[in-house]
Image (cartoon, helix red, strand yellow):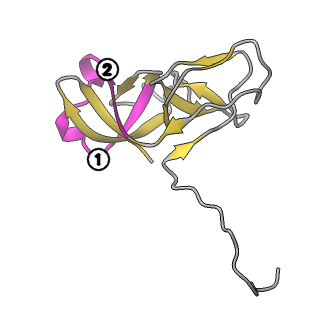
């Protein structure tokens, strides 16, 4: 393309909010960890090695009766608090800055579960109510 010769309305996105299409036969609850599957569609967080966490759903997205991409889910990036795993997989304050891993759509763990879990994000903080995960 040639260089501009007049003003241009350049669209922008702040990068903190995304709206991926939802996989077929899938329901994502508000507040859930949202991932992109191998097909490029949004699914709730789960124990799997092929998921890419992208953020947290801002509302419920029910595509349980639809085809892939029939609806989209609005997701927010940045730090959000989730349930901490238990026992040896519990995340501690000393893990701040480390990767944490998806157990399900509301729980994260310290380890990859012997290579069975995908990365959720970075541990941002840990408090009595759970683990703050930074989705970037």
Q: Is residue 53 visible?
A: no
Q: Secondary structure at mark 1?
A: loop
Residue at image x 67%, y 31%? 72
Q: Is residue 2 visible?
A: yes
Mark 1 burial class by Cα count in 10 Å: few <14, some 14-19, many 20+? some
Residue at image x 48%, y 48%? 16
Q: Nearer the viewer, residue 58 or 103?
A: 58
Residue 51: percent from the left, percent from the top? Answer: 58, 33
- Residue located beneath label 2 in the image: 85
Label annotation for residue 106: none
- Residue located beneath label 1 in the image: 97
Nearest to N terminus: mark 2 or mark 1:
2
Mark 2 burial class by Cα count in 10 Å: few <14, some 14-19, many 20+? many
Give the distance between the C-alpha atoms of the residues marked 2 and 1, in whole angstroms. 17 Å
The image shows residue 24, relative to residue 93, as above or below, that is: above
Residue 84: percent from the left, percent from the top? Answer: 29, 23
Q: Is residue 28 left or right of residue 8?
A: left
Residue at image x 68%, y 28%? 22
> In this picture, which residue range is highlighted in magenta?
79-102
The image shows residue 13, relative to residue 24, as above or below, that is: below
Judge whether residue 81 is colored magenta: yes
The image shows residue 10, relative to residue 122, as above or below, that is: below
Q: Is residue 26 left or right of residue 128?
A: right
Residue 33: percent from the left, percent from the top? Answer: 48, 28
Q: Nearer the viewer, residue 50 or 6?
A: 6
Residue at image x 53%, y 36%? 75
Judge whether residue 100 is colored magenta: yes
Q: Is residue 7 left or right of residue 115?
A: right
């Amino acid at each position: 393309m040639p260089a501009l010769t007049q003003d241009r309305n350049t669209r922008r996105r702040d990068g903190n909010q995304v709206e991926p299409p939802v996989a077929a036969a899938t329901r994502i609850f508000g507040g859930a960890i949202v991932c992109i599957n191998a097909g490029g569609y949004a699914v709730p967080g789960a124990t799997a090695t092929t998921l890419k966490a992208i953020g947290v759903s801002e509302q419920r997205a029910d595509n349980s009766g639809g085809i892939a991409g029939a609806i989209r889910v609005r997701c927010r990036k940045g730090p959000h608090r989730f349930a901490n795993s238990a026992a040896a997989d519990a995340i501690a304050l000393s893990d701040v800055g480390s990767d944490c891993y998806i157990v399900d759509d509301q729980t994260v763990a310290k380890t990859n579960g012997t290579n069975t879990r995908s990365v959720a994000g970075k541990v941002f903080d840990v408090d009595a109510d759970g683990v703050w995960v930074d989705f970037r």
